[in-house]
Amino acid sequence: MIKILSVTACLALFTACDLTKTPEDSLSPDTYFSNAAQLALWTQGYYSQLETPSVVTANADDNIDNQLGEVMMGQRSAANESAWTWSMLRKINYYFENCHRCEDEEVRAPYDAESHFMRAYFYFIKVRRYGDVPYYDKVIKDDDLSMLRKKRDDRGFVMDKIMEDLDMAHTLGNKNRDVAKVTKWTALALKSRAALFEGTYRKYRGMADADKYLKLAADAAEEFINNSGYTIYKTGEEPYRTLFNSADAKSEEVILARLYSTTANVMHGIQFNIKNDRQGFTKRFMNHYLMADGSFYSSQPDYAKQEFVDEVTGRDPRLAQTVLCPGYIQTGAKKVTANNLNALTGYQPIKFVGDAKYDGDNKAFSDFPIFRAAEVYLNFAEAKAELGTLTQNDLDISVNKIRDRVGMPHLELAAANSDIDPLMVEYYPNVTRSANTGVILEIRRERTIELAMEGFRIWDIIRWKEGQQLTKPFYGCYFHGEGEYDMDNDGKADLLLYTSNKGDWKGTAKQIGKDIILTGGQSGYIHALPTLTVTWNEDRDYLWPIPASERVLSGGALSQNPNWDDSTNFD
């Protein structure tokens, strides 16, 4: 199996022998791209653009850490925007201009499929970030000023090109499942993701063609569900937790993953970053989890003032497989790890966390899923709900398959639309008001908890036009005041909150007002990052700025996104 972890080595070769220029040895454009080995080596270089485990610590309203990032910190600017890079597109388009040298179309097909997929992926990331972008499907020569100074194409035009590429990737792609390589099923997964993003982005802004993209998303996801053979991983006592801390990607559900290996010395630092950046889920996120019987957490008496042990007891089993809860034993350990409030909010993630020996910086080698079946199922249900065509059978083949993994009661369409959780309405005030409002909110709930820490949340907030939710205070666990707390529910206190003197306490101790800030002073929710104010400009912040330097190089052909300032003096 050719593994994604080999990308670094491949790219080093490409740097040494740049095939976009005429070399002095035999690896010239006239002789390369002639067989499967050469096509495989070239296309393997595409995989470096795929998302890395850094998305785990991407902050939004659901989880935070002590670094937050440019979006939350308001640090985006046209002067320092760095993601406007096009070298990967050049590599992909160069392939298309030369792959005909392999005359056997059957041999070439899977590499053509990878190239179509990767160009679609490249442009989806660009549209998602910038909106309108210039579209190129050929290599631009250094002296072609008309193309180098091309204006931005309408995002709809670019999205349609993305859909065309994904259709070609699906047609030409290998039908066998392979977590390390793009297949026809990966193409359907990305099509459902990209089309859902565009459809909802347009719907929540009153833009044209929203339903067109929502239908494309639903159709792609439905074909995946019916024909791909992927399922929801359900093995073991804690299948959700196992899915993410397993060394090898679970191919029953994972469609495409980044592969890591101690043998190849390619590892990541997810566990290290969770602990050292003090990553923590927010109270808003925790409130999304239903009770184990399917009822709303907000229906519990005094739910807003429940302390940690009571709060996490009797909830959707995914909560205890995502958050450090009473009874948690780290993989490979023998003793329970109590919640010591290391996380900024008190809700410490355990998703992606394996054996403690991998806690060090870049010591973990569990594979990282980029596409998995559960996301496609959720894409299908959401697209159908937003279209107004969702049926109970649609839920049964999507959301309810996901719930079956952990034994949660099924989502019932009629009940969801007749009995709406007021907390979900509070958290998503811009949601479509229709006969399907309730089920749309329930699908958003499901998406929030099922896909936590997988890099989706900030983009979901953007496409739903819910940016103001990022400005809410970051609240965590509730405490009634100073005193001893039994955080692992074993009958013995293991945490002390105190105001001035901890006495002879030997365990974990936190001073109120210094180590933790509580919303009521001496009691209340942990108020993480209390001095930080997040702002959101509704007329600007859903898109990133076009780099000022690129606008200058284009001679002003590249327009700036609305309400972003730069120093170019172009209109």
Image: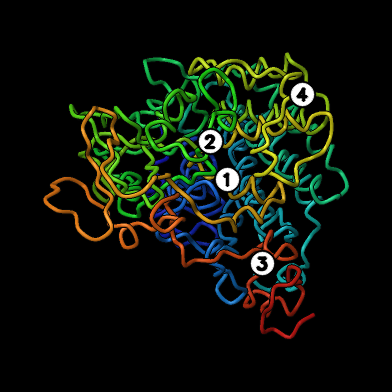
- Residue at coordinates 75% horizontally, 78% vertically from top-left? 556
In the image shown, does 7 or 338 lie closer to the viewer?
338
Depth-wise, is mark 4 or mark 3 nearer the camera? 4
In percent of width and height, residue 210 lies at 83, 42
Structural crowding at the residue carrying mark 1, measured as other residues with C-alpha within 10 Å and reported as few (<14), some (14–19) or many (≥20):
many
Q: Residues within 10 Å of mark 2 (few under 14, many from 20)?
A: some
Which residue corresponds to the image point at 61% horizontal and 43% vertical from the top-left?
Answer: 99
Res. 419 image quadrant: top right
Residue 14 can be seen, yes or no: no
Residue 121's disc is: none
Q: What residue is shown with label 1?
A: 457
- The residue labelled by disc 3 is 141
Q: Earlier in the sequence, mark 1 or mark 4?
A: 4
The amino acid sitting under disc 1 is: Arg
Q: Relative to 54, is 546 above or below?
A: below
Tell me the residue at 73%/13% (across/down).
Answer: 393
Are the residues flagged by discs 1 and 4 in contact, CB closer than 8 Å?
A: no
Residue 296: x and y in percent read 59, 27
Total label count?
4
- Left or right of 262 in this view: 17: right
Mark in front: 1 vs 3? 1
For residue 226, above or below residue 4: above
Measured in 3D between alpha carbons, the distance from the residue under mark 1 to the one under mark 4, in whole angstroms, is 27 Å
N-term-proximal mark, 3 vs 2: 3
Q: Amino acid at mark 3?
A: Lys
Mark toward the viewer: 3 or 2 = 2
Q: Alpha-carbon neighbours of circle 4 within 10 Å: few (<14), some, or many (≥20)?
A: few
358 vs 394, left or right, is: left
Alpha carbon separation for disc pair 1 and 2: 8 Å
Q: How far separated are the C-alphas under marks 3 and 2?
A: 42 Å
Residue matched to label 2: 451
Label of residue 418 in the image? 4
